[in-house]
Image: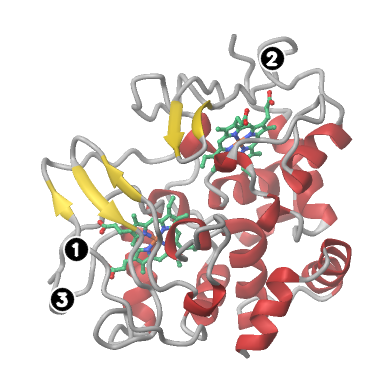
C-alpha cells in the first residue's frame, strides 16, 4: 500500500491524470479508499500542512502525515499540522472513523487524552470540509486511516485567545450529490475542499471575508521563500483573471505558473496535487471561477 501510495504521488503527471480521469469519471469509485486517495492527493492537499519537508523543501514521504514542518503563529493560536497517522500515542490511532469525520467537519477533537474535546484552530480548514458529501467524507477518512502509522511527537498547540470560525456561504452543509452534475456547482465544491479561498479571500489585514472579499487576494504570505502577495482570482478582466483563457487558468493550476510563464512561489506551487486532477474536474473549477463576481 505504501509503495502504491508513493508511486501514485510521484507518478508521471500525464499518467496520473489519465488514470484519475477514468477512475473519477467513467466509474466514480465513490465512498472508497480510491476515491479518498484521489481527493486527498489531487484536490485537498492534506500533505501541505501535515507532511514534514526535508532540507530541499520536498515532502518526506516516508514520514507522511506525521506532522508538518510549518508553524502558524497567529494572534489567537500557535499551531503546527498535527500527526494524523494511525500511531496510537503521537497520532490519531485511537480515534474511530466517526470521530475523525466529526473532527474534519466540526473542528472539535474527540473526548480523548490529551486534548479532551478541545476545538481545533481554524488553520485546519475544517469549515471548508463541511460541504463534503457523506460518501466523499467516508472515502477521505478511509484513505487517511490507511496511511501507515509514524511515531512523531508534534509540538502541542497553544491557544491564546478565543478562535473565530468563519463559515463559507453556500458551503455550510454537505452538498446534494445530484448538484455535482452541474460544472459550476461541482467547481464550487472542488474549489471549496481545495480551500482556494483560505488564501484568496483573506484581506491584507489577514481577516477572512468570504462575502465581500471573495477571490480578491491582497494578503501577504511569508515563508522561507520570502514574501508573496495572494493574487486576485475574481472574474475582473484587469485586476483578476477574467481575460485569461481556460487553458491559461488550468495551466496555472497543473503547472504552477502564471499567465506569463513565471513560476509561482510555494503557496501557489500546488501542481504537486492539481496536476493529478481529472480534466473534467479542472474544467469545473474554471467554470466556477468564471462566476466569482469581479472585484477590483
Ligand atoms: C492549511 C493547512 C491544513 C490543511 C490543508 C489540512 N490541515 Fe489538518 N490540521 C492543520 C493544523 C494546523 C492542525 C492542528 C490544529 C490545532 O492544533 O489546533 C490540524 C489538525 C488536524 C486534525 C486533528 C489532529 C489532532 O491530533 O488533533 C486532523 C484529524 C486533521 N487535521 C486532518 C486533516 C486532513 C485529513 C486533511 C486533508 C483532507 C487536512 N487535515 C488538511 C492544518 C491543515
Ligand atoms: C495556500 C494559499 C493558496 C491556496 C490554497 C490557493 N492559492 Fe492561488 N495563489 C496564492 C498565492 C500566494 C498566489 C500568488 C503566487 C505568486 O505570485 O507567486 C496565487 C495565485 C493564483 C493564481 C494566479 C493569478 C495571477 O494573477 O497570477 C491563480 C489563477 C490561483 N492562485 C488560483 C487558485 C485556485 C483556483 C486555488 C484552489 C484550487 C488556489 N489558487 C489555491 C495562494 C493560494
Quarter that holds the N terminus: bottom right
x 56%, y 57%: residue? 56
Residue 26: name its quadrant: bottom right
Instruction: Please say whether residue 210 is visible from this viewpoint.
Output: no
Mark 3, Cα crowd under 10 Å, few <14 / some 14-19 / many 20+, is few
Q: Nearer the viewer, mark 1 or mark 3?
A: 1
Residues marked 2 and 1 touching at CB (< 8 Å): no
Q: Measured from the top left, where is residue 64 in percent x and y?
A: 49, 74
x 51%, y 69%: residue? 137
Q: Measured from the top left, where is residue 43 in percent x and y?
A: 63, 57
Q: CA distance from mark 2 to mark 1?
A: 42 Å
* Nearest the eye: 74 or 128: 74
* Nearest the eye: 52 or 14: 52
Residue 89 badge: none
Q: CA distance from mark 2 to mark 3?
A: 47 Å
Q: In the figure, is residue 199 to the left or right of 295?
A: left
Q: Nearer the viewer, mark 2 or mark 1?
A: 1
- Ligand 1 location (quadrant): bottom left
Report whether the residue tagged 1 is closer than 8 Å to ligand 1: yes
x 56%, y 74%: residue? 61
Residues marked 1 and 3 touching at CB (< 8 Å): no
x 84%, y 54%: residue? 279
Residue 236 badge: 2
Residue 156 badge: 1
- Judging from the image, the colouring scheme is secondary structure
Q: Measured from the top left, where is residue 22 in percent x and y?
A: 86, 71
Quarter that holds the C terminus: top right
Circle nearer the N terminus (1, 3): 3
Q: CA distance from mark 1 to mark 3?
A: 17 Å
Q: Which residue is mark 3?
A: 111
Query: Secondary structure beneath disc 3?
Result: loop
Q: Measured from the top left, where is residue 121 in percent x and y?
A: 26, 51
Amino acid at each position: 500500500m505504501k509503495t502504491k501510495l508513493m508511486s501514485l504521488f510521484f507518478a508521471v503527471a500525464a499518467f496520473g491524470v489519465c488514470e484519475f480521469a477514468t477512475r473519477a469519471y467513467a466509474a466514480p469509485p465513490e465512498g472508497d479508499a480510491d476515491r479518498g486517495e484521489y481527493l486527498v492527493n489531487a484536490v485537498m492537499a492534506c500533505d501541505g500542512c501535515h507532511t514534514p519537508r526535508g532540507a530541499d523543501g520536498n515532502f518526506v514521504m516516508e514520514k507522511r502525515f506525521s506532522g508538518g514542518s510549518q508553524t502558524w503563529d497567529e494572534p489567537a493560536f500557535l499551531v503546527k499540522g498535527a500527526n494524523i497517522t494511525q500511531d496510537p500515542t503521537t497520532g490519531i490511532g485511537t480515534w474511530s472513523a466517526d470521530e475523525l469525520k466529526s473532527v474534519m467537519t466540526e473542528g472539535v477533537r474527540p473526548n480523548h487524552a490529551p486534548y479532551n474535546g478541545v476545538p481545533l484552530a481554524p488553520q485546519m480548514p475544517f469549515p471548508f470540509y463541511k460541504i463534503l458529501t457523506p460518501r466523499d467524507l467516508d472515502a477521505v477518512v478511509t484513505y487517511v486511516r490507511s496511511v501507515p502509522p509514524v511515531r512523531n511527537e508534534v509540538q502541542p498547540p497553544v491557544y491564546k485567545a478565543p478562535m473565530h470560525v468563519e463559515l463559507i456561504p453556500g458551503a455550510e452543509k454537505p452538498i446534494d450529490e445530484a448538484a455535482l452534475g452541474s460544472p459550476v456547482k461541482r467547481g464550487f465544491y472542488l474549489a471549496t475542499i481545495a480551500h482556494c479561498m483560505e488564501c484568496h479571500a483573506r484581506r491584507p489585514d489577514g481577516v477572512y471575508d468570504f462575502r465581500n472579499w471573495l477571490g480578491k487576494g491582497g494578503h501577504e504570505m511569508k515563508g522561507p521563500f520570502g514574501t508573496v502577495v495572494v493574487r486576485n482570482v475574481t472574474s475582473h478582466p484587469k485586476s483578476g483573471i477574467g481575460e485569461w483563457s481556460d487553458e491559461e487558468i488550468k495551466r496555472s493550476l497543473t503547472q504552477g505558473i502564471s499567465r506569463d510563464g513565471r513560476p509561482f512561489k510555494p503557496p501557489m506551487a500546488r501542481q504537486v496535487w492539481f496536476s493529478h486532477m481529472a480534466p473534467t474536474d479542472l474544467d469545473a473549477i474554471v467554470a466556477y471561477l468564471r462566476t466569482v463576481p469581479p472585484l477590483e
